[in-house]
Image (tube, rainbow, N blue to C red):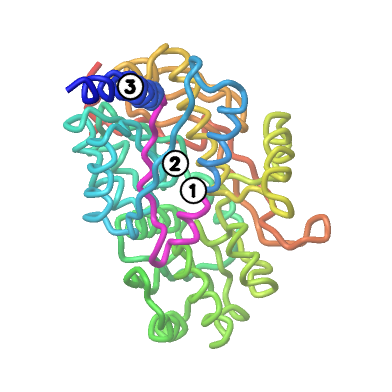
Amino acid sequence: MKIKQLILKRLLPLAACAAITMLGQASAFAQDIRVGVPTSLSGPWADLGNQVKRAVTFAANETNAQGGVLGRKLAIEYQDSEGKPEVARKQAEKLALSGNKILLGLIASGEGLAIAPMVERWDAIYISTINKTDKLTGDTCQARVFRVNRPDAADAAAVRPWLASRKEDKWAIMANDIAWGRNSGESFTKAAQGLGKKIVSDNYAPAGANDFAPYIQKIKDAGANGVWVALAGRDALNFAQQAKQFGLLANVTMAGVSFVTDSTVATLGDTSRGIYGIVNYSSTLGTPENKAFVDAWRKAYPGTEPTNFEGETYIGMQVLVQAIKAAKSDKPADLAKIMSGMSFDTILGKQVMRKEDHQLEGPNYFGIVAEQGGKLRPVIQTTVPSAQALPAPDPACKMPV
């Protein structure tokens, strides 16, 4: 009996220490500001998802190296959405219900639309950095959904001045058969027809399509002398390579959105030369804030510069960190309240989050793939100021005030 009591006396302090250690670890974990990133780490947009991951990781490391936010570290958890709306919703829910109440990083617009109605039920908040569909800040807008990237309507505004200067009068659409692709095709059609140009061929391919030959033949048969492309990731690469193989690139003017990107140009090489398109972000932008960001990025990822999707996602993280500081809280309800109407300092300059639809106001850009500094890259030709880049808020958005 005495031996048992002696053993217990020795074990109890050890157990108490272990319990205190575990409580301390749990307390430290609870103090982290937890961010969930459900993004496409596999499938046709895996490259885009990995760009999101690099940008979020970079921003979190940068913030944590400066002492975190409100003295707390950013902790990031990733889940693979596969680029599928139904998977995105499940992964976002898993993240939110396990404590990652701040969500960002979804690629496809359909993914954003799938989770938007759910975030308040999960007591979460969603910041879009890539979703382009106008509906996200239009008739399906939500009080806890915010967008920092440019929507399709802003891209149409950026392409319109260029389109007006072009002699091509017969255009074809080549887009993904998803919410974003359809929205982009509709926006371009409206802009083209408003300038007296004709759409002679509408083509929408399923995500992950490998064979674009039937679409290319339809475009050639229709006599198009211009093609508007709304394809991204692997789809954009497959289409461009096959368009060159079947002689389409040499005979028509190509322009697009998410088609003229740093990663696409890096993969396609000279095939991409002369393609026009929307440039939502570029590492070549000359703001002091962007120059500092690019310099820091080169140190973190030697031999690279931030791509358009990485730049846009970094802006999302800038907005988040500033909102947490302003709210003195990471609770979604507090963040949603403070972000609406708030002004943010970003790598593109000062931008305001519109109260009416939770769209971040900012400039947009149009350019061409050309050589700059000895490197083939998207080169900005036209800057569209914020006042012209974004149409007025959609009256269909009934944002609670």
Q: Are marks 2 and 1 in contact (CB under 8 Å)?
A: yes
- In primary-sequence order, the first of circles 2 and 1 is 1
Rendered location of residue 278, percent (x, y): 55, 52
**Secondary structure category for the residue under label 2:** loop
Q: Which residues are magenta?
A: 32-51
The answer for how far apart the CA atoms under marks 2 and 1 are is 9 Å
Residue at the (43%, 19%) spot, across then down: 324
Number of the front mark, 2 or 1: 1
Rendered location of residue 165, percent (x, y): 61, 56
- In primary-sequence order, the first of circles 1 and 3 is 3
**Secondary structure category for the residue under label 1:** helix
Q: Are marks 3 and 2 in contact (CB under 8 Å)?
A: no
Residue at which label 3 appears: 10
Residue at which label 2 appears: 129
Number of the front mark, 1 or 3: 3
Q: Amino acid at mark 2?
A: Thr
Q: Amino acid at mark 1?
A: Val
Residue 371 found in image quarter: bottom right
Q: Amino acid at mark 3?
A: Arg
